[in-house]
Amino acid sequence: MTMDNHEQARPTSESPASGATPPNAAPAGGHDMTTDFASELVPTMDRLIARIADAEADEHDWGTFEALAGTQPQAWKALACAQRDAALLAEAVLPAIDASERVRLPRSTSATLSASGSDRTARNARRSDAEFRYAPDLRRIGGWAIAAVIGLAWLGSMLAPEPRAIGPTNTNTAGILPTGWTINTPEDAVRAYLDVGSKSGRVLGEMPDRVIVRTTPTGGSTNGDDPQQIEVIYLRQFVERAVISEFFELGSDEFGRPVPIRLSIPPQPRPESWQ
Amino acid sequence: MVHADDRTIADAAEQALIARAIGGDGDALREVWERHRRWVAAILLAHKPRDADVEDLLQDVAVMLVSKVSDVREAGAFKPWLRAVTLSVALAKGRRSTVRRNGFLRVVDGWLGRPSQEKGGGDDGAGTKYAAVSQEAKRLLELARSLPGGYGEPLILKAVQGMSYREIGRVMGLPESTVETRIVRARRMLRERAMQDGLDRDGNSMNERHALGAPVRTEVAKHALATNGARP
């Protein structure tokens, strides 16, 4: 694609009249090249090929391209390459475009925008007419409230008398659980994990914050009598300790795939407090 | 080719829709989002960190749009504003990712399980659908993302069906001719990098076909016809 021609500004039917358009304004249409000095440095053939590959070419462009390609046969190959690149890029971009089709505006917020304060029925109907997959507005606006509720629930469970799980004890937990423990609920299992893990030195504790992953309204009446319930998906984070001798970090290979890369860490003197 | 009068009418209708959205009309805002989210996704794709998910970032942009759209001064400024919001979301995600990478040493050890499997080649948020994309296309996208600032974005935007130079210029706040120049240069840089990267299989095959003579021209012209629609 080494062409040395430089295209002259070609007149277009929509070119602005002289002095009618500010120098930096976008032209009304067509391919006005007078507004960009840099454009003069782009070879004509490159420009024509890009226009054809980008479906921006008009009759004049095609005529010019065919005339130039008559003396520069490699132009056809360059055009083919440009079209193939365009097709590949379109292929690569398509999944992201499809993903965008799934992302809707936060419905509750947009409903609030359009409904007047007195139009409560309409607002509630909008809110409940379809579920929205994500509720990032809740995650942000109501995040502190949800966190507080979860925090309270968690605190309540921590303050409950132990052992709080009373029930069938037919689960074989011999040798795993501390004396007096039974596992009937997930909280029992977590408590046992923390207790046993801390005794072995592997588990240091749980982070106080929980990360909201998704919030989804579970329903409620359209007249607003029933309180709206929200299903909250969240992460709990536990801190563990490990003693290891080999270190890796995630890198990527020549194809961009993640691969573990061994790290060499120089030997460190032990802290004085350890000696 | 779309007639200028039709384009003017469509532009006026869109400006009116955006003005309603800015004024607080939720239905209008929803329609505006549905019209523009595709190029928003393309900009995110151009600027996001490799391990970020486009769909997640789009959620963030959607939230910003809803909460901040009233700040837009006029309908004509909406597209550059939405692009700026999109860039800020992508860059903020990049900063968070950097902090995370620097803050934690990812440990790979038998009893800790396998290393987290990041979605190769930068995820697009489309899950299995992205797996169907050819390696060559993924690699070319990565090369496009690595182009110098100002070149990769218009090139990726052009890959979105329906985005013209003019439309890209409006989004980026640039004259149409500047957009075209950047795309021309971006295409050239991309091809050079692809050749260096060994992604020249098509070129080789074209060489073989070129040796046969005239069919090359016919074949390419047919392809161009299919791509461009009616050829003059």
Image (tube, coloured by chain):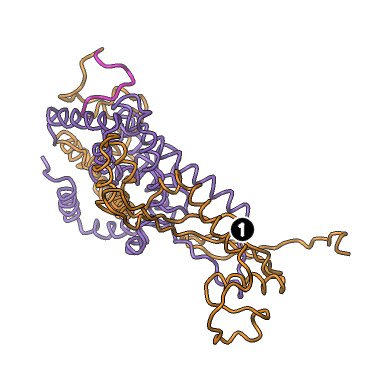
Chain colours: A orange, B purple
Asked if one can make out residue B138 in the rendered structure from this viewpoint, the answer is yes
Whether residue B218 is situated above or below residue B109 in the rendered picture: above
Name the spot of residue A26 as percent of width and height, x first.
29, 25
Q: What residue type is labelled 1?
A: Met
* Majority secondary structure in the magenta region: loop
Pointer 1 indicates a residue of which chain?
A
Q: Looking at the picture, tell me which residue is in the foreground, A209 or B39.
A: A209
Whether residue A260 is situated above or below residue B5 in the rendered picture: below
Report helix, strand or loop for mark 1.
loop
Is residue A26 one of those drawn in magenta?
yes
Q: Residue at position x 44%, y 61% from top?
A: B119
Asked if one can make out residue A244 in the rendered structure from this viewpoint, the answer is no
- Left or right side of A261 for B130: left
- Left or right side of A197 for A40: left
Quadrant assignment, res A39: top left
> Could you classify mark 1 by the number of other residues whose Cα lies within 10 Å: few (under 14), some (14-19), or many (20 or more)?
few
Q: Name the residue under label 1.
A: A207
Task: Tally the marks.
Answer: 1
